Image (cartoon, coloured by chain):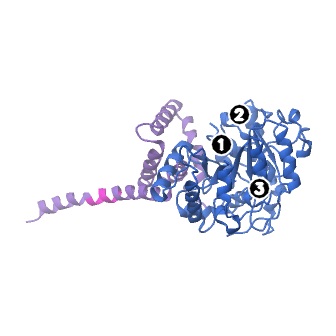
Chain colours: A blue, B purple
Amino acid sequence: MGLTLVSRKEPLASSREQMNRLAAAKTCPPFEEKLTAAGLQPLHATGITVFQINVGKFCNQTCRHCHVDAGPERTEQMTRETAELCISVLSQTGIPTVDITGGAPELNPNFRWLVEQARALGRHVMDRCNLTVLLLKPQAGLAEFLASNRVEVVASLPYFQSSQTDAQRGDGVFEKSVLAMQMLNRLGYGVGGSGLALNLVYNPVGAFLPAKQDAAEAKFRRELSRRHGVTFNHLYTITNMPISRFLEFLIESGNYEGYMERLANAFNPAAAAGVMCRYTLSVGWEGTLYDCDFNQMLDLPLGNGAPRHIRDFDPARLNTRRIVTANHCYGCTAGSGSSCGGAVT
Amino acid sequence: METYYHPHDLSKFAEMGKGNKELWEKFIGYYSAVFAEGALSEREKALIALGVAHAVQCPYCIDAYTQTCLEKGSNMEEMTEAVHVACAIRGGSSLVHGVQMRNVVDKLSM
């Protein structure tokens, strides 16, 4: 398993360095020019239907494409106090969906409390799960906990074969992921009629755009069933964002400029109109507010006068806030578009 | 390093329209129609294109259709098999001409 950019003391561990690289891309115009041409500049939120909580950067894996630079040596974790602020805000709103991410969110000591509180408020809860966390001995009973709380599991699986999956996520990850999916299936996850949703997330294993979502889903469904007897509900295709460890891969492999050009050439105005930041509010482990998890990792908090911390939550000023954009946003607007819920168009 | 083919030249392909716009537009219209989803899927067509790219040994086509195959959801195994199909047909087309050789030998020999 590799190490995080932070622990390797790489310059790219700095969000400022990443932003400098993005701004210096020679093969794409500034993102805002594309937005202007599409009649979308300035981009505004249309409301908040997804409350995404990033509970920290601690993870049991160190995936090569991770936009969080998460890993076992990261210590940033949302405290109970900040988690309570999130629940307090939720109780004052009708935001229907709570999307919990990380790192491996389940490894935050407040994860189960957060899930129970959000469920008690009647909210739909999603857990962005790396699958292998379900097999960790200290996490015994985690899958059962998720099932009993009717949590939607959104699980990362870049391919239905070990070679590609392990190349991105680490040696042996595919085999463990299959075991975890089989465990979830036994609990009813991904099984028709159970009401327990197991959705998979596919990221390309390299510097190219994802396949069409419906075609990829059909292929994954056929192959996972045939090879491992695994069933799931839906597959979400997500474009790799040119930040953090994926940015490092792009630069080191000589693919950076070509990838930025590919993203910009594939700019899709319909995808731009439907980007997830327009209906999502992202909360960082310290309680800072962002338009999305990617802006969070680039230290781009809400701007243009919007509240910047969960303690200052004000729906009137947040629902139509102006979105903060930069060249990384090409990642969400290329081709069929990309969001935490997969393709946009 | 100086080389006859430059990867960045692929992006200049549309400049062929400057010499004859009408023919270029007809070609692009036809090209787009060929690769659209039809009786064959876009993914299948990209694999055929990858095989043909190797048969005609076009570096631009190899670059373009390797990326396209990945973006249509094909994997290394499938793409390698497509290249082997091209190889088999190229090799087979040489070998089958051995029949011509045999015919000539038969005609010339006692």
Report whether mark 3 lies on the same chain as mark 2: yes
- Residue B92 covered by magenta stretch: yes
Quarter of the image that includes the N terminus of chain A:
bottom right
Helix, strand or loop under label 1 = loop
**Residue type pointed to by label 2:** Ala
Mark 2 falls on what kind of element? helix
Amino acid type, callout 1: Ala
| The residue stretch that appears in magenta | B90-95
* Magenta stretch: helix, strand or loop mostly: helix
Residue annotated with mark 2 = A273
The residue nearer to you, when weighing B56 against A118, is A118
Whole-number angstrom distance, CA of label 3 to CA of label 1: 33 Å
Structural crowding at the residue carrying mark 1, measured as other residues with C-alpha within 10 Å and reported as few (<14), some (14–19) or many (≥20): many
Label 3 neighbour load within 10 Å: few <14, some 14-19, many 20+: many
Between B29 and A71, the residue placed more toward the observer is A71
For disc 3, the chain is: A
Residue found at x 66% / y 45%: A263
Name the residue located 74 percent from the left edge and 64 percent from the top edge: A71
Which quadrant holds residue A207?
A: bottom right
Distance of label 1 from label 2 (alpha carbons): 12 Å
Q: Sequence-wise, which precedes: disc 3 or disc 1?
A: 3
- Residue B108 image offset from top left, x and y in percent: 12, 62
Q: Position of residue A87 (x, y in %)?
A: 83, 46
In terms of image quadrants, where is residue A338?
top right
In the foreground, A330 or A341: A341
In this view, the mark in front (3 or 1): 3
